[in-house]
Amino acid sequence: MPNTSALERAAPERETDMALEQEMTMYRFLQNYGEGLLGGLDADRAFVASTEGGHHPAWILGHLALVGNQGAQLLGGTPAIDIEAWKPLFGIGSQPTARAESYPEWAELVGAWRQTREVASSSAAAIDEEKLNEPNPIERRRDTLPTLGNFVGFIFTSHEAVHLGQLSAWRRGQGLPPLF
């Protein structure tokens, strides 16, 4: 059985850390990983799905930019994109299309995804623990992610990782080399 007393002693020290510090460390790692996944990608390939009904890179980056900006907004930050305009293209239930003209240009999508990191980081740095302990404002997710901190932590870590995994699989399907 593991030594739980060492874990118990470490827990109080975490309370003195900046709110969302661990989540933002993971988010920075994922953003760097995502930058690597963009290697070898251009606008000509970005709107091509690897499977029927699959997500193409343009949808993935647009979706991550949308959701990341929504998370930053929940923390009190100012979004880097027009959230309402992006929801029909990249929100829950949106269906990717291969028609590039249906989306912002590839360079804008990449830029918006990169700007999301700045908005999310500054919003997380400005938030206090008390606010993070408030109930999750997204009612349909409250059962599994009960607090605002749980929800935005999910957005900046697990959600980002899931979709970057899709991008990684897309790359492999296109014959591009793995990153690791």
Image (cartoon, rainbow, N blue to C red):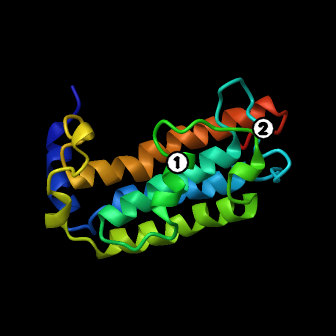
Q: Residue at x 19, y 35 (%)?
A: 143
Query: Which image quadrant is residue 52 in?
Result: top right
Q: How many marks?
A: 2
Location of residue 96 with respect to 38 vertically, above or below: above
Is residue 33 visible in the rendered image? The answer is yes
Image spot of residue 82 (x, y percent): 50, 66
Circle 2: element type: loop
Residue carrying label 2 = 48
Image spot of residue 9 (x, y percent): 15, 52
Image spot of residue 42 (x, y percent): 82, 53
**Hey, what amino acid is under mark 1?**
Pro
Residue carrying label 1 = 88
Location of residue 129 with respect to 55 vertically, above or below: below
Image spot of residue 113 (x, y percent): 59, 60
Q: Nearer the viewer, residue 16 or 138?
A: 138
Q: Earlier in the sequence, mark 2 or mark 1?
A: 2
Q: Which of 154 and 140 is in front in this view?
A: 140
**Which image quadrant: the N terminus?**
top left
Circle 1: element type: helix
Is residue 27 visible in the rendered image? The answer is no
Query: Which image quadrant is residue 15 in?
Result: bottom left
Q: Nearer the viewer, residue 50 or 96?
A: 96
Q: In the visual, does 63 lie left or right of 70?
A: right
Query: Which image quadrant is residue 170 in?
Result: top right
**Hey, what amino acid is under mark 2?**
Val
Viewer-side label of 2, 1: 1
Instruction: Give how far apart the Cα atoms at labels 2 and 1 are.
Output: 19 Å
Q: In the visual, does 35 lie left or right of 159?
A: right
Q: Which residue is drawn at 42% across and 53% down?
A: 156
Q: Residue at x 21, y 50 (%)?
A: 136
Q: How crowded is mark 2: few (under 14 residues within 10 Å), some or many (20 or more)?
A: many
